[in-house]
Image: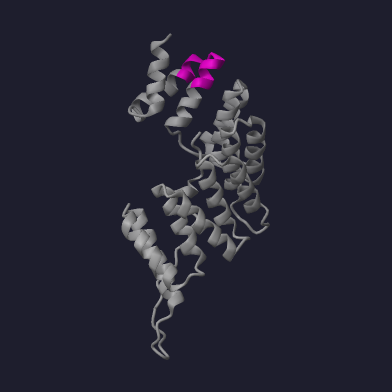
Amino acid sequence: MKFFVKIYALLLTITLFGCVNVVDDDDRKVDPVKVSEIYVQKSIEYIKTGNYAVALKDLKVAIDQNEDNIHAHNTIAMLYGRLGNSKKAEKHFNEAIDLDEKNSDVRHNYGTFLCSNGDYKKAEEQFLKAVSNPFYKQAKRSYVNAGICAEKSSDINKAGIYYLKSLRIDSRFSPALAAMSELSLRQKKYKKAKFYLDRYRKKSALNAKTAWTGYQIEDALGNRNLKSSYEILLKAKFPDSSETLKLLDYNNKK
Protein backbone atom coordinates (compact mmCIF):
# COMPACT_ATOMS: atom_id res chain seq x y z
CA MET A 1 0.00 0.00 0.00
CA LYS A 2 1.46 3.32 -1.04
CA PHE A 3 -0.51 6.08 0.56
CA PHE A 4 2.47 7.50 2.39
CA VAL A 5 1.78 11.10 3.04
CA LYS A 6 4.68 12.44 1.12
CA ILE A 7 6.75 13.21 4.03
CA TYR A 8 9.42 10.78 3.04
CA ALA A 9 9.80 12.67 -0.23
CA LEU A 10 12.20 14.80 1.87
CA LEU A 11 10.61 18.17 1.27
CA LEU A 12 7.33 18.55 3.16
CA THR A 13 8.64 18.25 6.69
CA ILE A 14 11.81 20.32 6.28
CA THR A 15 11.64 23.98 7.16
CA LEU A 16 13.04 26.14 4.42
CA PHE A 17 14.98 29.05 5.77
CA GLY A 18 14.96 32.48 4.22
CA CYS A 19 18.15 34.02 2.94
CA VAL A 20 20.42 35.21 5.70
CA ASN A 21 23.70 37.07 5.78
CA VAL A 22 26.66 35.06 6.91
CA VAL A 23 28.56 38.18 7.94
CA ASP A 24 27.79 40.17 11.07
CA ASP A 25 27.77 43.87 10.17
CA ASP A 26 29.30 44.78 13.52
CA ASP A 27 32.43 42.65 13.63
CA ARG A 28 32.43 41.06 10.15
CA LYS A 29 32.77 37.57 11.62
CA VAL A 30 31.27 34.55 9.94
CA ASP A 31 28.45 32.96 11.94
CA PRO A 32 28.77 29.16 11.58
CA VAL A 33 25.14 28.63 12.67
CA LYS A 34 23.90 30.82 9.81
CA VAL A 35 26.33 29.24 7.38
CA SER A 36 25.02 25.82 8.39
CA GLU A 37 21.44 26.85 7.72
CA ILE A 38 22.35 28.21 4.29
CA TYR A 39 23.95 24.89 3.35
CA VAL A 40 20.82 23.03 4.46
CA GLN A 41 18.71 25.29 2.24
CA LYS A 42 21.08 24.75 -0.68
CA SER A 43 20.92 20.99 -0.19
CA ILE A 44 17.14 21.01 -0.33
CA GLU A 45 17.22 22.79 -3.67
CA TYR A 46 19.64 20.18 -5.00
CA ILE A 47 17.41 17.40 -3.68
CA LYS A 48 14.48 18.89 -5.59
CA THR A 49 16.43 18.56 -8.83
CA GLY A 50 17.74 15.09 -8.03
CA ASN A 51 21.33 16.20 -7.58
CA TYR A 52 21.88 14.04 -4.53
CA ALA A 53 25.67 14.00 -4.63
CA VAL A 54 25.94 17.76 -4.27
CA ALA A 55 23.13 17.82 -1.71
CA LEU A 56 24.96 15.26 0.38
CA LYS A 57 28.18 17.28 0.18
CA ASP A 58 26.37 20.45 1.31
CA LEU A 59 24.70 18.66 4.21
CA LYS A 60 28.05 17.39 5.42
CA VAL A 61 29.32 20.98 5.36
CA ALA A 62 26.22 22.10 7.26
CA ILE A 63 26.94 19.57 10.00
CA ASP A 64 30.61 20.48 10.08
CA GLN A 65 29.63 24.10 10.61
CA ASN A 66 27.07 23.29 13.30
CA GLU A 67 26.88 19.73 14.59
CA ASP A 68 23.78 20.69 16.60
CA ASN A 69 21.74 21.59 13.50
CA ILE A 70 18.76 19.27 13.82
CA HIS A 71 17.48 20.19 10.35
CA ALA A 72 20.77 19.11 8.81
CA HIS A 73 20.70 15.74 10.60
CA ASN A 74 17.03 15.21 9.71
CA THR A 75 17.61 16.04 6.05
CA ILE A 76 20.77 13.99 5.61
CA ALA A 77 19.09 11.04 7.35
CA MET A 78 16.23 11.09 4.84
CA LEU A 79 18.65 11.49 1.97
CA TYR A 80 20.74 8.55 3.14
CA GLY A 81 17.51 6.56 3.40
CA ARG A 82 16.67 7.42 -0.20
CA LEU A 83 20.17 6.43 -1.27
CA GLY A 84 19.83 3.06 0.47
CA ASN A 85 22.38 3.70 3.21
CA SER A 86 20.26 2.58 6.14
CA LYS A 87 23.08 2.55 8.67
CA LYS A 88 23.96 6.21 8.17
CA ALA A 89 20.30 7.19 7.91
CA GLU A 90 19.56 5.66 11.29
CA LYS A 91 22.67 7.26 12.80
CA HIS A 92 21.57 10.77 11.81
CA PHE A 93 17.93 10.20 12.81
CA ASN A 94 19.16 9.24 16.26
CA GLU A 95 21.42 12.27 16.40
CA ALA A 96 18.48 14.51 15.50
CA ILE A 97 16.36 12.89 18.22
CA ASP A 98 19.17 13.34 20.74
CA LEU A 99 19.11 17.05 19.91
CA ASP A 100 15.34 17.32 20.36
CA GLU A 101 13.46 14.20 21.44
CA LYS A 102 10.11 16.02 21.16
CA ASN A 103 10.55 16.97 17.52
CA SER A 104 7.57 15.27 15.91
CA ASP A 105 8.69 15.84 12.33
CA VAL A 106 11.90 13.92 13.00
CA ARG A 107 9.94 11.15 14.75
CA HIS A 108 7.55 10.95 11.78
CA ASN A 109 10.37 10.78 9.25
CA TYR A 110 12.22 8.17 11.28
CA GLY A 111 9.06 6.10 11.57
CA THR A 112 8.50 6.31 7.83
CA PHE A 113 12.08 5.20 7.22
CA LEU A 114 11.75 2.27 9.64
CA CYS A 115 8.46 1.16 8.11
CA SER A 116 9.89 1.22 4.59
CA ASN A 117 12.68 -1.04 5.88
CA GLY A 118 10.27 -3.52 7.44
CA ASP A 119 10.82 -2.61 11.09
CA TYR A 120 7.10 -2.14 11.75
CA LYS A 121 7.11 -2.25 15.54
CA LYS A 122 9.81 0.39 15.93
CA ALA A 123 8.14 2.48 13.23
CA GLU A 124 4.85 2.43 15.13
CA GLU A 125 6.65 3.56 18.27
CA GLN A 126 8.08 6.56 16.43
CA PHE A 127 4.71 7.55 14.97
CA LEU A 128 3.07 7.35 18.38
CA LYS A 129 5.83 9.48 19.89
CA ALA A 130 5.24 12.01 17.12
CA VAL A 131 1.51 12.30 17.86
CA SER A 132 2.06 12.39 21.62
CA ASN A 133 3.29 15.97 21.24
CA PRO A 134 0.17 18.13 21.80
CA PHE A 135 1.68 20.90 19.68
CA TYR A 136 2.24 18.71 16.64
CA LYS A 137 0.06 20.08 13.86
CA GLN A 138 0.40 17.16 11.46
CA ALA A 139 -0.61 14.22 13.63
CA LYS A 140 -3.13 13.18 10.96
CA ARG A 141 -0.34 12.19 8.60
CA SER A 142 1.52 10.20 11.27
CA TYR A 143 -1.64 8.24 12.02
CA VAL A 144 -2.02 7.40 8.31
CA ASN A 145 1.55 6.16 8.09
CA ALA A 146 1.08 4.18 11.30
CA GLY A 147 -1.95 2.58 9.66
CA ILE A 148 0.01 1.71 6.55
CA CYS A 149 2.67 0.08 8.72
CA ALA A 150 0.01 -1.88 10.55
CA GLU A 151 -1.35 -3.14 7.23
CA LYS A 152 2.12 -4.18 6.13
CA SER A 153 2.44 -6.19 9.33
CA SER A 154 -0.98 -7.77 8.57
CA ASP A 155 -2.73 -6.06 11.49
CA ILE A 156 -5.79 -4.88 9.58
CA ASN A 157 -7.83 -3.94 12.64
CA LYS A 158 -5.09 -1.70 14.02
CA ALA A 159 -4.69 -0.09 10.60
CA GLY A 160 -8.34 0.89 10.57
CA ILE A 161 -8.06 2.36 14.05
CA TYR A 162 -5.18 4.59 12.98
CA TYR A 163 -6.91 5.75 9.79
CA LEU A 164 -9.99 6.69 11.79
CA LYS A 165 -7.85 8.60 14.29
CA SER A 166 -6.51 10.60 11.36
CA LEU A 167 -10.03 11.31 10.12
CA ARG A 168 -11.12 12.45 13.58
CA ILE A 169 -8.49 15.15 13.31
CA ASP A 170 -9.44 16.07 9.73
CA SER A 171 -12.49 14.37 8.26
CA ARG A 172 -11.47 15.46 4.75
CA PHE A 173 -7.87 14.30 4.85
CA SER A 174 -7.48 12.64 1.44
CA PRO A 175 -4.78 10.05 2.26
CA ALA A 176 -6.84 8.77 5.20
CA LEU A 177 -10.03 8.60 3.13
CA ALA A 178 -8.25 6.72 0.34
CA ALA A 179 -6.66 4.36 2.83
CA MET A 180 -9.98 3.60 4.53
CA SER A 181 -11.63 2.99 1.17
CA GLU A 182 -8.97 0.50 0.10
CA LEU A 183 -8.92 -1.18 3.49
CA SER A 184 -12.70 -1.59 3.44
CA LEU A 185 -12.44 -3.03 -0.08
CA ARG A 186 -9.91 -5.59 1.15
CA GLN A 187 -12.31 -6.49 3.95
CA LYS A 188 -15.12 -6.89 1.35
CA LYS A 189 -17.08 -4.11 3.03
CA TYR A 190 -18.03 -2.63 -0.32
CA LYS A 191 -20.61 -0.05 0.75
CA LYS A 192 -18.25 1.26 3.36
CA ALA A 193 -15.46 1.40 0.79
CA LYS A 194 -17.70 3.36 -1.55
CA PHE A 195 -18.64 5.77 1.24
CA TYR A 196 -15.02 6.68 1.91
CA LEU A 197 -14.12 6.91 -1.77
CA ASP A 198 -17.07 9.23 -2.42
CA ARG A 199 -15.82 11.46 0.39
CA TYR A 200 -12.35 11.35 -1.10
CA ARG A 201 -13.67 12.46 -4.49
CA LYS A 202 -15.26 15.54 -2.97
CA LYS A 203 -11.81 16.67 -1.84
CA SER A 204 -9.35 15.28 -4.37
CA ALA A 205 -9.09 14.22 -7.99
CA LEU A 206 -8.87 10.53 -8.70
CA ASN A 207 -5.47 9.06 -9.45
CA ALA A 208 -4.75 5.65 -10.94
CA LYS A 209 -4.84 3.89 -7.58
CA THR A 210 -8.11 5.41 -6.35
CA ALA A 211 -9.73 4.92 -9.77
CA TRP A 212 -8.80 1.23 -9.65
CA THR A 213 -10.22 1.03 -6.14
CA GLY A 214 -13.42 2.62 -7.43
CA TYR A 215 -13.63 0.16 -10.31
CA GLN A 216 -13.32 -2.80 -7.96
CA ILE A 217 -15.92 -1.39 -5.58
CA GLU A 218 -18.51 -0.81 -8.30
CA ASP A 219 -17.76 -4.18 -9.86
CA ALA A 220 -18.42 -5.87 -6.52
CA LEU A 221 -21.63 -3.88 -6.04
CA GLY A 222 -22.83 -4.65 -9.58
CA ASN A 223 -22.99 -1.01 -10.66
CA ARG A 224 -22.15 -1.41 -14.34
CA ASN A 225 -22.34 2.23 -15.39
CA LEU A 226 -20.12 3.46 -12.57
CA LYS A 227 -17.71 0.59 -13.14
CA SER A 228 -17.54 1.53 -16.80
CA SER A 229 -16.79 5.17 -15.97
CA TYR A 230 -13.82 4.13 -13.86
CA GLU A 231 -12.61 1.84 -16.65
CA ILE A 232 -12.78 4.67 -19.18
CA LEU A 233 -10.93 6.99 -16.82
CA LEU A 234 -8.13 4.49 -16.21
CA LYS A 235 -7.61 3.80 -19.91
CA ALA A 236 -7.80 7.46 -20.92
CA LYS A 237 -5.80 9.18 -18.18
CA PHE A 238 -3.55 6.42 -16.85
CA PRO A 239 -2.94 4.07 -19.80
CA ASP A 240 0.56 3.08 -18.67
CA SER A 241 -0.18 2.68 -14.97
CA SER A 242 0.11 -0.62 -13.14
CA GLU A 243 -3.54 -0.23 -12.16
CA THR A 244 -4.66 -0.12 -15.81
CA LEU A 245 -2.59 -3.23 -16.48
CA LYS A 246 -4.40 -4.91 -13.60
CA LEU A 247 -7.71 -3.84 -15.14
CA LEU A 248 -6.81 -5.29 -18.53
CA ASP A 249 -5.61 -8.51 -16.96
CA TYR A 250 -8.78 -8.73 -14.90
CA ASN A 251 -10.98 -8.27 -17.97
CA ASN A 252 -8.98 -10.80 -19.98
CA LYS A 253 -9.56 -13.45 -17.33
CA LYS A 254 -13.34 -13.04 -17.37
Asked if residue 241 shows in the view, the reply is yes
Query: Is 210 placed left or right of 150 in the picture?
Result: left
Q: Position of residue 13 (x, y in %)?
A: 50, 55
Q: Is residue 254 above or below residue 144?
A: above
Residue extending furthest toward the front: 87
Asked if residue 18 shows in the view, the reply is no
Q: Position of residue 79 (x, y in %)?
A: 42, 53
Q: Is residue 132 above or below residue 22?
A: above
Foreground residue among 221 and 101: 101
Query: Is 21 placed left or right of 108 in the picture?
Result: left
Look at the image and say whether residue 40 sits in the magenta stretch. no
The overriding secondary structure of the stretch rendered in magenta is: helix
Look at the image and say whether residue 221 sits in the magenta stretch. yes
Foreground residue among 103 and 18: 103
> Which quadrant is the C terminus positioned in?
top left
Q: Position of residue 204 (x, y in %)?
A: 49, 39
- The residue depicted at 38 percent of the width and 88 percent of the height is 28
Question: Which region is colored magenta?
Answer: 216-227
Q: Is residue 81 above or below residue 158?
A: below
Residue extending furthest toward the bottom: 27
